[in-house]
Image: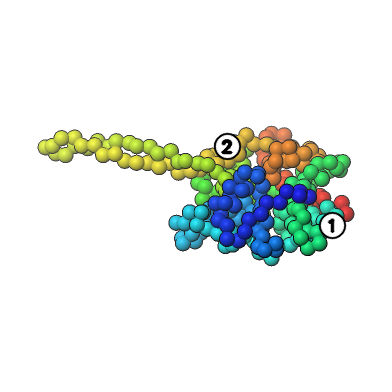
C-alpha cells in the first residue's frame, strides 16, 4: 500500500481536485469530512464530469462544480493487515481500482491497482499474456471525435480505446486521463471570402473556422505494447515502469489482438491466495 493518501473535502471544487491529481500524479482522491471517509473521486469520475450528458452541467466551469456531486459514495475499506491477494480479489469483484486502508478505524494509506501490479511484476508465473488478455477491444480512427471516443471509453469495462491507422495497426491509446487532463486548444482558422455585388465593388467577409478536437489530438503516443507470448510479469513490469494501466497486445504482424490491463493483473494476483 501507499502511505501517501491525497484528500479532498466534499465541498472542494472539481478544479481543485483536478489540480491535485495532476500535481501528485494520482488517479484517485479520498474524500474526507471530519476525519470520516465519505467518498472516492477518480480520474474516471473527473472525465465524466468534463464531458457531461446533462445540459445544465455543460455550461458550468469545473471551478463551480463540487466534489460532492461526482464522488463515489459507500466506500469500501480494508484493514492494514489484509493479504494483498485478498485486496486484489475485492477490487476485482467490485470493479474498483483502489481501497483506502484503515488502522484502528483511521485512514492509514491506500492500496491501488498500481500496488498490485508491482506485486505481480515480481512474481515468476510462467503464464503468458495471451492466456489472460481481454479480446473485447474498442477501436477508433485518429479522426474520430472526442465525443465518439468518450462514448466507447465508458462502455468498455477497462476504459481504454485503441487508435488504429488505415492498416489496423495501433498508433495511440485513449484513457480517462487523456480526457480529464488534456490541454488542447483548438486551432482557429480565419479565411477571407470575396464577393462582388453587381454594379459595385468587391467586398470581403472574414469567416472563422474552429477545428474540432479528435482522438488523434488527445491520444497517448507512441503506443507502449506487449506481445501475445510475453509473460504476464513482463507486461506488469512495463506497466509499472511506464506508469500506465493497459497495454495493447500485438500478434506477430503488429495487429492488436487483445489488451492487458490492471484488471487482468488483479485476476492473476487474486488467484495467488
Residue for badge 1:
82
Q: Residues within 10 Å of mark 2 (few under 14, many from 20)?
A: some
Viewer-closest of 98 and 14 = 14
Single out the residue that lies furthest toward the bottom: 74
Q: Residue at x 63, y 56 (%)?
A: 8
Viewer-closest of 33 and 86 = 33
Q: Residue at x 51, y 54 (%)?
A: 63
Position in image of residue 56 (x %, y %): 46, 62
Residue 235 figure quarter = top right
Residue 155, can we see it?
Answer: no
Dot 2: what SS?
loop
Position in image of residue 171 (x %, y %): 60, 36
Of mark 1 and mark 2, the one earlier in the sequence is 1
Disc ID at residue 100: none
Position in image of residue 196 (x %, y %): 19, 37
Report whether 152 appears left or right of 105.
Answer: left
Report whether 136 appears left or right of 104.
Answer: left
**Vertical relation: 247 (above or below) 6:** above
Position in image of residue 239 (x %, y %): 73, 41
Residue 71, can we see it?
Answer: yes
Q: Residue at x 77, y 39 (%)?
A: 237
Report whether 37 appears left or right of 161.
Answer: right
Dot 1: what SS?
loop
Residue for badge 2:
165
Report whether 88 appears left or right of 162.
Answer: right
Q: Is the C-beta separation of discs 1 and 2 under 8 Å?
A: no
Which quadrant is home to the C terminus? bottom right
Amino acid at each position: 500500500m501507499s502511505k501517501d493518501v491525497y484528500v479532498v473535502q466534499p465541498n472542494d471544487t472539481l478544479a481543485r481536485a483536478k489540480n491535485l491529481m495532476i500535481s501528485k500524479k494520482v488517479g484517485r482522491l479520498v474524500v474526507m469530512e471530519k476525519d470520516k471517509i465519505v467518498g472516492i473521486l477518480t480520474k474516471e469520475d473527473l472525465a465524466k464530469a468534463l464531458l457531461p450528458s446533462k445540459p445544465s452541467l455543460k455550461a458550468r466551469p469545473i471551478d463551480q462544480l463540487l466534489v460532492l456531486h461526482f464522488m463515489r459514495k459507500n466506500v469500501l475499506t480494508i484493514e492494514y493487515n489484509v493479504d494483498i491477494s485478498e485486496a486484489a480479489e475485492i477490487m476485482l469483484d467490485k470493479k474498483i481500482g483502489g481501497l483506502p486502508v484503515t488502522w484502528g478505524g483511521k485512514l492509514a494509506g491506500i492500496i491501488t491497482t498500481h500496488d498490485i501490479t508491482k506485486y505481480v511484476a515480481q512474481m515468476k508465473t510462467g503464464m503468458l499474456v495471451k492466456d489472460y488478455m481481454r479480446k473485447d477491444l474498442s477501436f477508433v480512427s485518429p479522426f474520430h471525435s472526442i465525443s465518439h471516443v468518450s462514448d466507447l471509453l465508458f462502455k468498455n469495462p477497462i476504459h481504454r480505446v485503441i487508435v488504429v491507422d488505415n492498416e489496423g495497426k495501433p498508433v495511440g491509446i485513449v484513457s480517462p486521463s487523456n480526457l480529464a487532463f488534456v490541454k488542447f486548444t483548438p486551432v482557429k482558422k480565419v479565411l477571407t471570402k470575396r464577393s462582388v455585388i453587381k454594379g459595385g465593388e468587391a467586398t470581403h467577409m472574414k469567416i472563422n473556422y474552429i477545428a474540432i478536437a479528435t482522438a488523434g489530438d488527445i491520444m497517448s503516443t507512441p503506443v507502449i505494447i506487449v506481445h501475445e507470448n510475453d509473460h504476464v510479469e513482463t507486461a506488469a513490469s512495463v506497466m509499472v515502469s511506464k506508469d500506465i494501466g493497459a497495454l495493447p497486445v500485438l500478434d506477430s504482424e503488429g495487429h492488436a489482438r487483445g489488451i492487458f490491463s490492471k484488471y487482468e493483473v488483479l485476476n492473476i494476483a487474486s488467484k495467488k491466495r
